[in-house]
């Protein structure tokens, strides 16, 4: 669908329009009011880990500025807000002793959101594991999954009377494989065996959390947010097709299959070729706890290229030499969001899908008039929403969309360089300036259609 067809990209009036953030990326106050240390605090305080030596110590100072941020959300007409809860703010040692000021913070935030008519969507784990649990083995240890279920109990008992939408995990692939195999994220380890055990215990903790949340908040809708992508072979060669199968297995199927009750994909079990003693009797049943929705975090397609085939021998290559890219180098491919949604519905048929993250980083600047004009982000969002509307029109049960992100924020190993927000943050003063994309998004939300 081209931009000329924008008017056809319509959404139902009950469509959930929102924006998303996460605790470590925006809150700051890393050691205030009794909060415990997280693995991201430790990682950022280790020299050489993060671009520019940046840390989340202050971030967007949302812990102190949440009132102003909720007021901005209301002004922009958000219907929903997806945030994450900091586990070490509630449980400084990961389990046991509760930090009441931490709970108070989320109680106030939730109340303010509801007062503003904004539906809270809570994520329990967006990567900030209590360091105390990492010191006992982190996600490769089964006890961390048990601790997670306890934390889910505390959070849902405290907030479940008001929060009716929950996601135990955000992007467990990133936690497991970037944190424990690639080492680019906290805790910075590089072991495949650890990564596989971590992935399993993340999923197990999720599976145990689902009935706990439902018990504490009986009418709750519970889902999970996965980073999902289409995988395209770099060329028509057999070797690249094989590389694509493996990449799809690693990023998509390793999580989707067990959640859908199919266990781990056997081709990938063979590919890893590692014993998996951590999978115990009953685990796969727990992981397959039925979900109300699957959260889809989509940014770009993935190109799979086999090392076995020199690119020069790949004729014709699938990869476009002059692809449109965002400031972090990710290819802009909105039509692949349509493909992804169709594939998810066809292959897995979850009850409902929500796009829980979609957005782009650009090098936004404050203009001489004090405004931040970001036409490239508007264009990115517009084309992705058109793709989403097309999937919806073709029968995909897509119920909502959350732009990543509400605010410019701490982009993990890349620090504060990339700006993903629809609201600009001047980190020196903490001044917030809604970008032109925020005003454009307001018109989309008001009209339930992709406007020009
Ligand atoms: O900033 C991240 C977010 O924490 C998880 N999903 C992808 C975003 C952009 O990289």
Image (cartoon, rainbow, N blue to C red):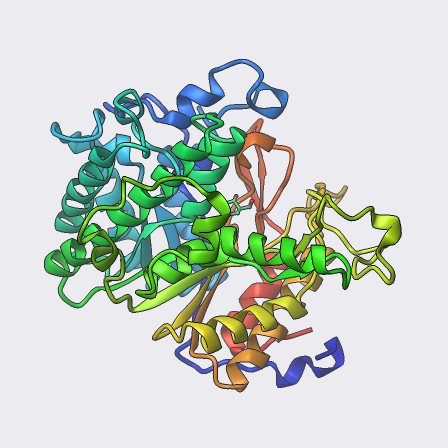
Q: Position of residue 232 (x, y in %)?
A: 67, 61
Q: Residue at x 47, y 27 (%)?
A: 56
Residue 395 is situated, as x and y percent measured from the top left of the image, at: 48, 85
Quarter of image, res 115: bottom left
Q: Most extreme residue toward the top, as rendered?
A: 47
Q: Name above or below for residue 170 compared with residue 336.
A: above
23 with respect to 218 (left or right): right
Quadrant showing the C terminus: bottom right
Q: Is 243 or 114 nearer to us in this picture?
A: 243
Q: Is residue 157 above or below residue 77?
A: above
Tell me where residue 78 appears, x and y as whole percent.
44, 62
| Quadrant (top left, top right, bottom left, bottom right) of the N terminus | bottom right
For residue 124, say whether it is visible. Answer: no
Name which residue lies at 56% across and 30% down: 413
Position of residue 260 relative to residue 68, above or below, is below
Foreground of the two, 210 or 235: 235
The image shows a total of numbered marks equal to 0
Q: Position of residue 75 (x, y in %)?
A: 47, 58
In which image quadrant can residue 197 be found?
A: top left
**Residue 415 or residue 273, whichever sits in front:** 273
Q: Is residue 72 above or below residue 182?
A: below
Q: Report the residue at 30% width, 65% height from top.
A: 261
Can see residue 12?
A: yes
**Residue at position x 18%, y 44% in the image:** 149
């Amino acid at each position: 669908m081209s931009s000329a067809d924008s008017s056809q990209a319509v959404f139902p009036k009950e469509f959930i329009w929102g924006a998303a953030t996460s605790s470590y990326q925006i809150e700051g106050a890393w050691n205030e009011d009794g909060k415990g240390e997280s693995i991201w605090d430790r990682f950022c305080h280790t020299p050489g880990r993060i671009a520019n030596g940046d840390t989340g110590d202050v971030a967007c100072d949302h812990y102190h500025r949440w009132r102003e941020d909720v007021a901005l959300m209301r002004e922009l007409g958000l219907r929903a807000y997806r945030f994450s809860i900091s586990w070490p703010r509630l449980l400084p040692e990961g389990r046991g002793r509760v930090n009441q000021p931490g709970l108070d913070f989320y109680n106030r935030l939730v109340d303010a959101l509801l007062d503003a008519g904004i539906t809270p969507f809570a994520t329990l784990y967006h990567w900030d594991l209590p360091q105390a649990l990492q010191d006992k083995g982190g996600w490769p240890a089964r006890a961390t999954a048990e601790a997670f279920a306890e934390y889910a109990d505390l959070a849902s008992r405290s907030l479940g009377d008001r929060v009716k939408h929950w996601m135990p995990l955000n992007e467990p692939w990133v936690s497991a494989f970037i944190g424990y195999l690639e080492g680019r994220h906290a805790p910075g380890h590089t072991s495949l065996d650890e990564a596989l055990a971590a992935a399993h215990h993340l999923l197990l903790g999720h599976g145990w959390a689902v009935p706990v949340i439902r018990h504490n908040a009986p009418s709750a809708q519970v889902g999970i947010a996965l980073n999902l992508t289409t995988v395209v072979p770099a060329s028509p060669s057999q070797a690249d097709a094989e590389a694509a199968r493996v990449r799809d297995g690693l990023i998509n199927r390793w999580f989707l299959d067990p959640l859908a009750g199919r266990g781990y994909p056997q081709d990938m079990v063979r590919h890893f070729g590692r014993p998996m003693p951590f999978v115990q009797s009953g685990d796969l049943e727990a992981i397959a706890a039925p979900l109300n929705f699957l959260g889809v975090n989509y940014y770009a397609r993935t190109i799979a290229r086999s090392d076995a085939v020199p690119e020069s021998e790949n004729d014709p290559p699938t990869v476009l030499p002059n692809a449109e890219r965002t400031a972090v180098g990710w290819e802009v491919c909105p039509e692949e969001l349509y493909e992804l949604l169709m594939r998810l519905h066809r292959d897995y048929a979850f009850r409902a899908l929500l796009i829980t993250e979609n957005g782009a980083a650009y090098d936004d600047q404050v203009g001489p008039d004090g405004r931040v004009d970001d036409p490239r982000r508007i264009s990115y969002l517009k084309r992705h929403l058109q793709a989403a509307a097309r999937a919806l029109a073709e029968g995909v049960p897509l119920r909502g969309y959350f732009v990543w992100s509400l605010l410019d924020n701490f982009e993990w190993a890349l620090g504060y360089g990339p700006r993903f927000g629809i609201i600009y943050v001047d980190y020196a003063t903490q001044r917030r300036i809604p970008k032109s994309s925020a005003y454009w998004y307001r018109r989309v939300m008001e009209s339930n259609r992709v406007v020009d």
